[in-house]
């Protein structure tokens, strides 16, 4: 029997990796983690965690706006102080997780790992062998191939700015653009969004997207649709962005938010017989690559389900259970909630409104819970929810517009995955008064 340095080696240390690594270590396997950047990956250090922290004070501003005529005190966010707070809270997380891994007995090797074959990995001149590998290398920001691309910034850069620019321009019409733009405009910055299409925020309810863009326009964001950026030039302390149609914008900061690209290059996948495309690594129903002893998980996968932190964690947990023999069955995803962390938020779960309109088995109902539950939803009159009900009166999908959309979609995730009926809801008691209990009551009546 072949002898290896490790039972399982993870290339990458984010959520797609470390959850499985900890479980396998608890299963008495010898485990290693390879990381070339920062322990715990993008979400913890440069993505979800710092983003939601930076947004916190702006959520307060958003809620204050619902009490015009009642609250009269001006409140402003001091960006440099907010950035210091972010560093204080977020920066120690990586070291904390590193200590947790080491305490568990996981070996950590810092450096760029390159597969030499199906069982061998080289890290900065050192070679390690492993019975199994898990590739969890995630994604990186796309960079436009245009003149002056060196003047653009990534989402990671944005979340490390010491000062908020007076003028900021986002290229792209996706999640990163909208989440950051909804923050920037509340600082008083002049904000532009340049999108190659007018179909922004694909995957979310079009009616809710239109409401959101209308609200952001009213706050001062300037949208430029059907525009392809082809040049960025430096002009003193400013930058000039030009598009193919002739649009010219003068700005102080440009964020290239044109997408993210799976990290499949330069890690030796070809050497190990792992198949991949520009969309990511190809896997079977057990998350195994074309080389059966090599798994892959997280955003590096070529997959149809959303590339989110929760799906990466779900896949990581599955891989550990599969390797340990706890779960020999193929991976099966439940209904997956999606949230756009703008102000207000958008969220969805299960069957969408557009899908329901194409299928006679489904009924779509709109619940304007912001209007009906004014005292619970703090005067957020625009908040609403579209629910999708199947022909057996079960909740199978929902799409929400409102500040509490993230928490509400988590409540409805249970309902959708368990195919809850009105009778099911009637057998439970919920805390009152609370925002979620009010929505549950409205939902119960619609399911009857």
Image: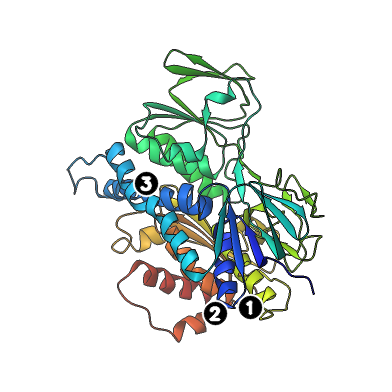
Up the image or down, 296 lies above or below 332; here it is above
From the viewer's side, name the closer residue of 117 and 395. 117
Whole-percent x, y for residue 197 in the image? 63, 34
Up the image or down, 427 lies above or below 151; here it is below
From the viewer's side, name the closer residue of 396 and 16. 16
Q: CA distance from mark 2 to mark 1?
A: 8 Å
Is tag 2's residue or tag 1's residue first in the polypeptide sequence?
1
Q: Secondary structure at mark 3?
A: helix
Q: CA distance from mark 3 to mark 1?
A: 43 Å
Q: Identify residue for label 2.
A: 421
Note whether residue 444 is visible.
yes
Name the mark nearer the viewer: 3 or 1: 3
Note whether residue 359 is visible.
no
Query: Residue placed at 72% from the left, 47% from the top?
Result: 279
Is tag 3's residue or tag 1's residue first in the polypeptide sequence?
3
Query: Residue placed at 40% from the left, 47% from the top?
Result: 343
Left or right, residue 141 beside residue 361: left
Query: Residue placed at 33% from the left, 35% from the top?
Result: 187
Tag 2 and tag 1, C-beta contact below 8 Å: yes
Name the disc covering residue 392, or none. 1
Q: Identify residue for label 3.
A: 54
Residue 199 lies in what quarter of the image?
top right
């Amino acid at each position: 029997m072949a002898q290896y340095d490790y039972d399982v080696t993870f290339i990458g240390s984010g959520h797609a990796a470390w959850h499985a690594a900890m479980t396998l270590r608890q299963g008495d396997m010898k485990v290693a983690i390879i990381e070339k950047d920062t322990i715990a990956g993008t979400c913890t250090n440069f993505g979800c965690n710092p983003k939601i922290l930076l947004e916190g004070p702006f959520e307060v501003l958003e809620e204050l706006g619902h009490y015009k005529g009642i609250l009269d005190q001006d409140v402003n966010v001091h960006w440099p102080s907010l950035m210091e707070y972010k560093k204080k809270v977020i920066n120690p997380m990586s070291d904390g997780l590193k200590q947790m891994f080491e305490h568990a007995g996981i070996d950590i090797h810092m450096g760029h790992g390159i597969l030499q074959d199906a069982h061998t990995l080289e890290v900065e001149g050192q070679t390690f062998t492993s019975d199994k590998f898990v590739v969890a290398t995630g994604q990186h920001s796309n960079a436009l191939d245009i003149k002056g691309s060196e003047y653009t910034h990534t989402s990671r850069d944005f979340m490390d700015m010491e000062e908020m620019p007076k003028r900021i321009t986002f290229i792209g019409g996706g999640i990163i653009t909208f989440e950051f733009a909804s923050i920037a405009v509340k600082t008083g910055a002049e904000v532009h969004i340049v999108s190659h299409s007018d179909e922004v925020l694909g995957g979310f309810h079009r009616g809710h997207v239109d409401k959101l863009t209308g609200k952001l326009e009213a706050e001062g964001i300037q949208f430029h649709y059907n525009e392809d950026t082809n040049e960025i030039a430096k002009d003193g302390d400013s930058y000039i962005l030009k598009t193919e149609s002739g649009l010219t914008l003068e700005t102080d900061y440009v964020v290239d938010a044109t997408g993210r690209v799976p990290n499949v290059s330069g890690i030796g996948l070809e050497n190990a017989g792992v198949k991949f495309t520009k969309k990511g690594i190809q896997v079977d129903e057990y998350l195994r690559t074309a080389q059966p002893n090599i798994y892959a998980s997280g955003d590096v996968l070529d997959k149809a389900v959303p590339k989110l932190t929760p799906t990466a964690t779900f896949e990581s947990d599955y891989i550990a259970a599969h390797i340990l023999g706890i779960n020999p069955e193929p991976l099966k995803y439940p209904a997956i909630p999606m949230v756009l962390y703008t102000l207000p938020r958008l969220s969805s779960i299960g069957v969408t409104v557009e899908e329901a309109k194409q299928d006679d088995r489904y009924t779509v109902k709109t619940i304007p819970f912001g209007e009906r539950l004014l005292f619970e939803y703090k005067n957020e009159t625009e908040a609403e929810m579209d629910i999708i009900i199947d022909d057996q009166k079960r909740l199978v999908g929902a799409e929400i517009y409102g500040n509490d959309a993230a928490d509400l979609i988590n409540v409805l995730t249970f309902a959708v995955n368990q195919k809850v009926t009105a009778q099911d809801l009637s057998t439970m008691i919920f805390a009152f008064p609370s925002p979620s209990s009010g929505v549950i009551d409205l939902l119960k009546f619609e399911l009857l």
